[in-house]
Amino acid sequence: MNSNENLSIQNEVEFENSMIAEYSESEMTRSMENIAGACSRENGSDVGINRRPAKRNREINHEEVWSTVVRKSKRYGRSGNDDTTGIPEDKIEVSITCKEPLPKQFGLAKMLRVENIKNVIKVKYINSFKALIHFSDEASAECLLQSKKFKENGITCQRTLEINQSYGVIKDIDLNLEEEEIMQEMSSQTAILGVKRLKRKNTNDGHWEPSESVRICFKGSSLPAYVYIFDTRVNVSPYTFPVTQCSRCWRFGHSIKFCPSLKIICPKCTKGHSNCETTLFKCNNCHGRHMAMAKICPVFIKEKRIREIMAEFNCSYKRALTVYVPQSPRSNNMLQDPHLPTPLYERRSRKESKSEETKKGKEVKRNGRGHF
């Protein structure tokens, strides 16, 4: 082999070694770039990719932490004491009633100031003849109850959950005895405030006439078992107040004289006229398929039962509401007919409700929650 061939072979080997070195160097450079790109993508700092920079880590300031905002409870009228701006749980409520319309807002406020009655939280007018006054302490409520100015104006004041008067009935009293004579000749261990001869409707002509039953009003919450008339002992029965119904709005609990509404309601269809000839009845109280004065109305049955509880436990209307147990209506598919009346209540459910009411009434009386 001559020198020229050796030189060519050596040159080819050197060329191949240089190519291998360049290729290895380029591969290493490319792999390093890939590793650097992967690291930059993980850190989110790659210039070619539009990414948000990482947030700074800073210490949490507890004073700047979000707090939950809750709606405040309803606030009533402000009183003289800033610490008692709301009605407490055991609110002190006094009811004032009068046979004549009560003074308006400013007139009543003037009477309260003249009598030095303070700590009034709220005054709510039920109608023109009745209002409820809420107090923040017992002393102010007692001051209103003992006010002579209100009594002189014919305004009766009493607590809503208590009763100051009890009513009983005596029967078989001669019709020729006048109320004044009965009052003078009657004696009892409990103070007697008044008597009234009851009336009954004559079945022949439909007119009201005096009956032999006399209602007696006693002072206090206890009803005596008997009274004496002409030195004769007469048993006293609890008096059950009838359910009054307004002939204008056909609601229960008041008459047309004390109706707070001036709108005339039809007792048959509940529209704004006095009467109509429709046969598709609708009650204004329960929206049932009967007239407003029907005795099968669930609202009438409820009001009647509440008055029976008032007579049984000798309690106020509000106290009787806490004892009352509603009854369940009977189910019947035939009642889908609009011409049929509202369903009556089952006797079984009424018996169960009455037993539960008796139990609740005894518990309330035993625990001493209010005066019966």
Image (cartoon, grey):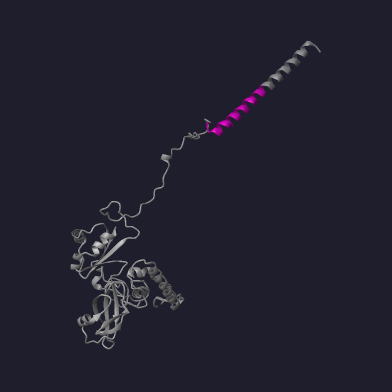
**Vertical placement of residue 272 versus 233, above or below:** above
The reply to whether residue 207 is visible in this rendering is no
Q: Is residue 167 above or below residue 5?
A: below
Residue 328 in which image quadrant: bottom left
Q: Give residue 275's position: percent from left, percent from top.
A: 28, 76
Q: Is residue 41 magenta?
A: yes
Q: Position of residue 355 (x, y in %)?
A: 43, 74
- Nearest to the observer: residue 19 or residue 358: 358
List the single residue furthest toward the right.
1
The quarter of the rendered structure image containing the N terminus is top right
Q: Nearer the viewer, residue 365 or 132?
A: 365
Which quadrant of the view contains residue 244?
A: bottom left
Q: Is residue 238 left or right of residue 349?
A: left
Q: How many marks?
A: 0
Q: Residue at x 25, y 70 (%)?
A: 259
* Residue 39 seen from this side: yes
Q: Residue furthest top?
A: 3
Q: Answer with left or right where residue 9 lies relative to residue 354.
A: right
Report if residue 278 lies within the magenta region.
Answer: no
Q: Quarter holding the C terminus?
A: bottom left
Q: Nearer the viewer, residue 242 or 367?
A: 367
What percent of the width, then of the height, locates residue 347?
A: 43, 78
Q: Which residues are magenta?
A: 22-45
| Residue 84: percent from left, percent from top | 30, 54
Q: Please, what is the dominant secondary structure of the magenta stretch? A: helix
Residue 106 vertical position relative to residue 314 in the rendered view, above or below: above
